[in-house]
Image (cartoon, rainbow, N blue to C red):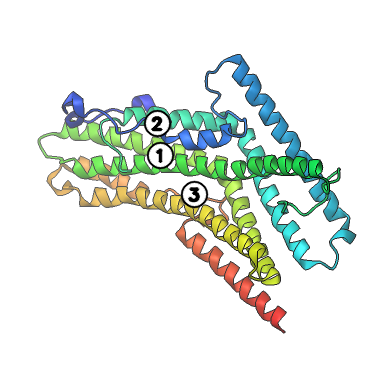
Amino acid sequence: MPKVEQLQQSPEQQQQPQQQQRCDYDYDDFTYIPNMVFKSMGYDFLSGSKPLWQHLLLSAYFGLGFVINCYISYYMILRILQWDTLSGNPKLIMRYAIMVFVMLNSDVKFFAFVAYRRRLRLLNSALKRLHKMGKDDTFQFIRAYPMELGFSTKTLSGYVIATIVESAFSLLTMNVNLGTDLWLVCLSTQISMHFDHVAKKLNQYNPSNGNEQENHQFVIDLVNEHQLIFSLHKELNHLFGVLLAYNLFSTASSLCCVALYTIVQGLNLEGLSYLLFFFTTAAQFYVVCHSGQILIDSSNSIAAAAYKQNWYDSATSYKKSLLLILMRAQKPAELSARGIIIISLDTFTILINITFRFFAVVRTVLAK
């Protein structure tokens, strides 16, 4: 597999004035938000340098959040197993179902993220190095939970403790849920930007018959960079493939449960709050799907750039090399949920259609 260090600038780029050899932003600025989302729950994914007391404080905070997460999860599962507390109450069942899907979604994402932590760091470092090599151009770029806990929440002190515990649980759950998606979008967008960068260089290059050596070197550098980006895309798919498949399933389940709960509950204050949750969940998945669509479009742009180039003025050897790039670009880079489905805007449309069909069917059944 080609290394980042093998990427070279074209002769035209090497001749550009030094003041133009800069990028509008630093790579760390790009990853700041997803990194801070995880830091806000005490988990320093990138393990940046910090004093010992900060490391201990973050570890203690994360440990406390993890214990609280296990505590809330235990009672949530316990109350479900004690079915007599839920039997005959469809509204309560739907509330539990929504919470369980959200909790499982966050837990699966977090444990998978931790399991792949080392490889995600390597992927992030590779993209950071690639970003530095690409500086010759500017990229375009009343209680939250219904179950009873292990103590009385009917007193003032119990209510305050329960609120704190549930707030900490919500913070951990939602930050993991959002943080993993943000890292996926961040890394996917970086890869898309490099595809656009390759397409732009290919589109702007003017080959000529009298410059065969320069044309040959340009193609070698471009193919190496193209292969490197595809290898990073393959690693991204491997790391996030299972999460994408599960995310698709859990999002569809959550949206259907919210739709059913809204029908049963009616358009009161609580029903409206769950309706808002429906739209925020759908919006979060839309961002992931939009990122997948951008990746597909960016990788396809290389084939279009190769076709539009002035290749007819070049030597036969250059045309053959360009043909190889065209053939490789015929299969676009995609965010794939382990081959189950391609994550794109079409996927989001399918998901929303399924949800509203489910909503219509349930509403018709309940009306009878």
Within 10 angstroms of label 2, few (less than 14), some, or many (20 or more) residues? some
Establish if 88 lies above or below 227.
below
Instruction: Name the residue located 70 percent from the left edge and 80 percent from the top edge.
Output: 365
Residue that carries the numbered disc 2 in the rendered image: 27
Q: Position of residue 183 (x, y in %)?
A: 51, 40
Establish if 278 lies above or below 171.
below
Q: Position of residue 58 (x, y in %)?
A: 63, 25
- Indicate the quadrant containing the C terminus: top left, top right, bottom left or bottom right: bottom right
Instruction: Name the residue located 19 percent from the left edge and 48 percent from the top edge.
Output: 309
Real-space Cα distance between discs 2 and 1?
9 Å
Q: Which quadrant of the view contains residue 13?
A: top left
Task: Report helix, strand or loop for mark 1.
Answer: helix
Q: Which quadrant of the view contains residue 212?
A: top left
Q: Say which mark, if any, is on residue 45.
A: none
Q: Mark 2 vs mark 3: which is more N-terminal?
A: 2
Q: Position of residue 286 (x, y in %)?
A: 49, 56
The residue mark sitting in front, 2 or 3, is 2
Q: Which quadrant of the view contains residue 24?
A: top left
Residue that carries the numbered disc 3 in the rendered image: 335
Instruction: Name the residue located 40 percent from the left edge and 51 percent from the top edge.
Output: 294
Q: Position of residue 64 (x, y in %)?
A: 72, 31
Residue that carries the numbered disc 1 in the rendered image: 190
